[in-house]
């Protein structure tokens, strides 16, 4: 079974390094980290990208802020087995573009 850690963020670049450091120090407790960016305007994407060589990270980025509940609901579809091999997921006319660093 695969264990994913989901971290929802909105303009939280000043906190993401500390959170990802904590994940890395737990030595294999999670198989992947999924960052759900709810339309941030800060440098969160660049900071997440810097961690990609140290821990398996996927970034789910909303084009605009839709709130944490809707973002997490979209993340559930994103993490489903049916969506694993897709580059994007269609949610009734709304596309989720996946970014993955390995």
Image: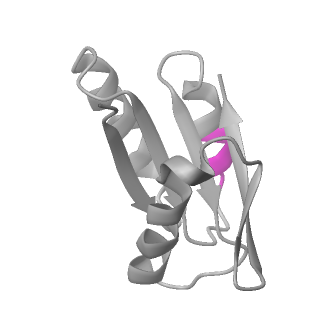
- Can the viewer see residue 74? yes
Q: Image quadrant of residue 91?
A: bottom right
Residue at 65 percent of width and 70 percent of height: 62
**Does 40 sit above or below residue 101?**
below
Q: Which of the pair 5/16 is nearer the observer? A: 5
State which quarter of the image contains the C terminus.
top right
**Does 41 sit above or below residue 55?**
below
What's the colour scheme? one colour
Q: Which of the pair 4/20 is nearer the observer? A: 4
Residue 63: give x, y in percent of width and height: 73, 74
State which quarter of the image contains the N terminus.
top left
Residue at 48 percent of width and 54 percent of height: 80
- Can the viewer see residue 13? no
Residue at 50 percent of width and 16 percent of height: 54
The chief SS type of the magenta part is helix
Q: Is residue 86 magenta?
A: no
**Does 33 sit above or below residue 90?**
above
Stretch of the chain drawn in magenta: 43-47
Say whether residue 34 is left or right of residue 87: left
Residue 71: give x, y in percent of width and height: 49, 74
Say whether residue 12 is left or right of residue 46: left
Q: Which of the pair 96/19 is nearer the observer? A: 96
**Does 29 sit above or below residue 7?**
above
Residue 29: give x, y in percent of width and height: 23, 24
Say whether residue 45 is left or right of residue 21: right
Residue 39: give x, y in percent of width and height: 63, 72
């Amino acid at each position: 079974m695969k264990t994913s850690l989901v971290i929802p963020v909105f303009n939280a670049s000043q906190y993401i390094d500390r959170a990802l450091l904590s994940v890395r120090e737990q030595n294999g407790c999670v198989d992947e980290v999924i960052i759900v960016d709810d339309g941030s305007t800060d440098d969160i994407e660049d900071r997440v990208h810097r961690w990609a060589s140290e821990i398996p990270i996927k970034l789910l980025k909303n084009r605009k802020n839709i709130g944490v509940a809707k973002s997490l609901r979209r993340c559930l579809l994103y993490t489903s087995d049916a969506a694993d091999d897709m580059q994007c997921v269609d949610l009734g006319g709304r596309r989720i573009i996946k970014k993955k660093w390995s």
